[in-house]
Image (spheres, grey):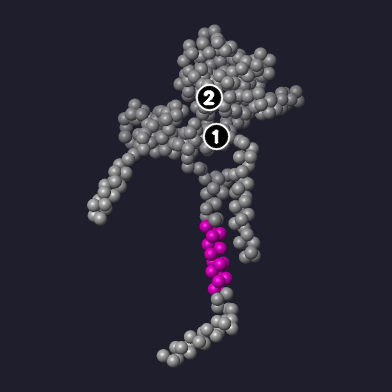
Amino acid sequence: MAKTLFILPFFIFFGVIIYFAIPIVKKSDPKLLPSALVDKDVPQNKLPPLSKNKRGFDHEDLVGGETLVNFFSSWCGPCRVEHDLLMKISKEKTVRLFGINYKDQTQAAINWLNQLGDPFERIVADKDGRAAIDWGVYGVPETYLIDKQGKVRYRHVGPLTERILEEKLMPIIQLLRNNKDD
Amino acid sequence: MTRVRALILVLFSCLTYIQPTMALQPNERLADPLLEERARMLSQNIRCLVCQNQSIDDSNATLAKDLRVLVREKLTAGATNDEIFDFLVDRYGDFILLNPPFKPTTYVLWYGPLIFLIFGILMVVLIMKRSNRRSFEKPLSQEEQASLSKLLEQKDKT
């Protein structure tokens, strides 16, 4: 009995080492947080369209099909990085793509879209960032996957990459689409 | 010597006057000192998710500023402290609280130290018991017996 007790600290020690080593080996970024909104309804904000000739949306427009909602800003560097991929998603119609322009100047955002192309089917402006707080946004760019009931299924923080799209988003989208056929 | 002591005292008292630079801007403050005090208290317990190891009271991140303003707006509108914490947890999860809540998923966190303390005390008691038993129950070796009688002999002589 006593002997096992004396060995126990070593086992606890190795247990702790393994626990802390897993995220290092897996190279997961501890700064990326899961969304608190997963499996909950999207927030019901009424945001204006970015400009007169763009279509806006609210939570009701998200019902009916899978949608990616992308928070971006013209002042945000990583948003530029993911923009080409967003253009590709829009061109290939991989999935419906809506945009929320975060704490930006309207003209700067319009210039950005004119210059780099506008991948968003619909786009609204969140001038003061209050809607973003309701979504739990803590750093642009952020991308939310919404199912056809208007519930949040996944959130990616940071620029979207081909790999994230293929390995994280597409499997969930496929699953959601397959459920529709049932 | 007294001079050195005085110098140390002066230096030390200087240190106590150093205060951390504040992220809070003067125009963010509320006019009502009581509400402002509550706002400060709340802000110091809300994590800035951009920096992650600072409270929104300390952080210069724009999101921290937005949240500070939001907290003050809610306080002015009459919200309770718990309502404000709940509002933020609904959106950002428990991680936004710098003080982890007490619930089944955090039992290990809260009870862990207590378990380790009990474990430690148990070990100490066990070790002490053992060493006690050893020193009392074991008969003296021949060498020990010899040196003991030698000492006793010496004592008798004096």
Q: Assign a secondary structure to mark 2.
A: loop
Q: Quadrant of the C terminus of chain A?
A: top right
Q: Mark 2 points at which residue?
A: A140
Q: Which sits in the foreground, A129 or B78?
A: A129
Q: Residue furthest bottom?
A: B157
Residue A17 x, y percent position in the rendering? 60, 48
Instruction: Identify the chain of the residue marked 1, using the numbered disc in the image.
Output: A
User: Relative to A47, is B80 on the left or the right?
Assistant: left
Are the numbered discs 2 and 1 placed on the same chain, yes or no?
Answer: yes
Residue B29 visible in the shown view: yes
Q: Tell me which segment is drawn in magenta.
A: B117-133
Residue at label 1?
A: A31
Question: Residue A149 sits in which quadrant?
Answer: top right
Q: Earlier in the sequence, mark 2 or mark 1?
A: 1
Residue drawn at 36 percent across, 29 percent down = B25
Residue lying at 51% horizontally and 24% vertically, measured from the top left: A132
Q: How many labels does the image show?
A: 2
**Amino acid type of the residue tagged 1 in the rendering:** Lys
Answer above or below: position of B71 versus A79.
below
Residue A172 in the figure: left or right of residue B50: right
Q: Does the magenta stretch include residue B127?
A: yes
Q: Residue at x 59, y 78 (%)?
A: B138
Chain letter, disc 2 residue: A
- Residue A36 highlighted magenta (yes or no): no
Q: Main secondary structure of the magenta part?
A: helix
